[in-house]
Amino acid sequence: MSVVDHHPPAAPPAAPGPCPGATRPHRRTLARPTVAGLSAATALLLCVSGGVWAFIALRLNIATLTDSADNAVDFLSRTLPLDFPPAGELLSLIWQTLAIVVSATVLSVVLSVPLALLAARNTTPGAGARLASRGLIVLCRAVPEVVFAITAFRVFGLGGMTGVVALGVHSVGMVGKLYADAVEQTDEGPRTALRATGAGRLQQITAAVLPQALPSLVATALHRLDINLRASAVLGFVGVNGLGYALSTAITTLDYQRAMAIALVLLLLCFVAESISGAIRRTLLQDVTAVRRPRRPRPERKGARRDRRPGGTAPARPSSGATAATTAIATAASVAHGGTSVRRSLPRWDARRIRRTTWLVLTVALVVASALRSGLSWSTLRRGAESFFPTLGDFLPPGTGGIGDQLWADLWVTLQIALAGTLIGLVLALPLGTLAARNVVGSPRVARFFRTVILLVRAIPELVLAIVFVVVTGLGAVSGALALGVGSVGLLGKLVADSLEETDPGPARALVATGARRHQVFFGSVLPRAWPAVVGHLLYQLDVNLRSATLLGIVGAGGIGYDLLNAARVLQFPVVTTIVLMVLALVLLIEGLAVWVRKVYA
């Protein structure tokens, strides 16, 4: 008889574990790479590799610069002493340039506001209108201002109107995009309140959307004013009067003493305009973002006169922080509910309101004087509108003029110039932008010094840099790449510094609390968080440099810009259209890549 064991089988021996006091090893986990992330990294690697390849292919090296040292010394000797125009003539040229630039900026604002409202998601009437307005904005940004100048010259002829239309229409590409972004970022609360009172779409936009976006709209217009001032130098080479035309005339006659004197005046003018507009933009932003402390309610004095209403309650006074949107909501509510009259209290004429009113009056006076000086009139506009479509027919259909192979080769050179110039700008702008960030260097004086250096470089028009490098290094793509490389320091350095300063200070403070040093905080916290924005700025700079490389060919800096100017001079306007379409396709490709990469790294 067998004996059955009813006890359960013994459990298998447990694996040896750590001692109770031992610390478990830390298991580090990394996010799995995604297909989109790998694709974006590959695209960026290809862009950097293309810049290195273009740098080598164009033979940009120390030997090239060393061989050009003698030319630089000879050029400097031919520019000194500087030959400034007479004071009256110089002031007239400055006023003519400023009038064209101010009028063009105002025109871009007038055209961009309705386009931005159609392009913004929260104000557009439909998807079709949004797509059409976005496409028109991209088209204005992709077509160089010199092409608009050539077309406007055929419509309006000689005069300031050509420069106003060329700069104004091209500026819509940037101003319209930034305006649409500002409209989309507005708070929907005031607009929802207006909609609840029965206000229409136009009332909602004018009373709730535009007042919120107004500081950003003004800041963008001032920023575009600086850009248009530098771009006015290019329009002088196609016959637009002002400092640019005087510079073009001096270069054509090899009068470098007069040319460099005018270039110095243009540089100082750009620097002053950038400094003033920058101060105004900072004041606007501080005025909007400043948090005001609420006033304490004053105790009611004895014997104070009370409102004789049922109940004897005193009327409620509006808060000092009430916005224009809130006031408009109350007004719209009264209108929607039968038009009951509302007692409106106007703000007091304090020093702040007097100052704002004074600036507004001066601005309106400047705009009117600029329009008169630029030759703007209804008769000119009517004459231009009548000849617009016949002139447009001169540019259609596109043609190559028998130089199709040369156009493709020069477009390839233009791409090389843009890639090499962006790489040079990146190498120079990263350290300068880092030293200009206050949260990185820790010293406000050091950051302010490098900010000033970046501002000085940014004030130099790329066309002036191209002229200098063409004389020093000779005609060709080398001068264009060097000009774009130095010119990129101004914009890219500023964007890098802003991106570093806008990072969240919390992680950096945590590292400092652990005893980390300044370079450890920078590479461990600040740079990783700012890197996606820096990548987006780099692709934006490549986009800008591609359009700038097209323009620099006008002064012999290589690329397809030289073909563009020659085609306009011999009245081969179908060739101009073909060049514009080629550059447009390349710009749209780079812009699409930039949008996709920013979306991946967002």
Image (spheres, rainbow, N blue to C red):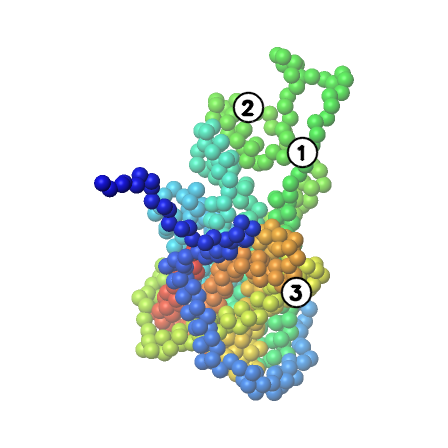
- Residue 247, picture quadrant: bottom right
User: First in sequence: mark 1 or mark 2?
Assistant: 1
Residue at the image point whose x is 63% and y is 12% from the top: 311
Which residue position holds label 2? 341
Q: Is residue 476 above or below residue 342?
A: below
Q: Is residue 154 above or below residue 137?
A: below
Residue 308 x, y percent position in the rendering? 66, 14
Helix, strand or loop under label 1:
loop
* Disc 1 residue crowd, few under 14, some 14–19, many 20+, Cα 10 Å: few
Q: Which amino acid does label 1 sit on?
A: Pro
- Residue 434, picture quadrant: bottom right
Alpha carbon separation for disc pair 1 and 2 = 29 Å
Marks 1 and 2 close (CB-CB < 8 Å) = no
Residue at the image point whose x is 36% and y is 43% from the top: 126
Residue 17 x, y percent position in the rendering? 47, 53
Which residue position holds label 3? 450
Which residue position holds label 1? 294
Q: Which amino acid does label 3 sit on?
A: Phe
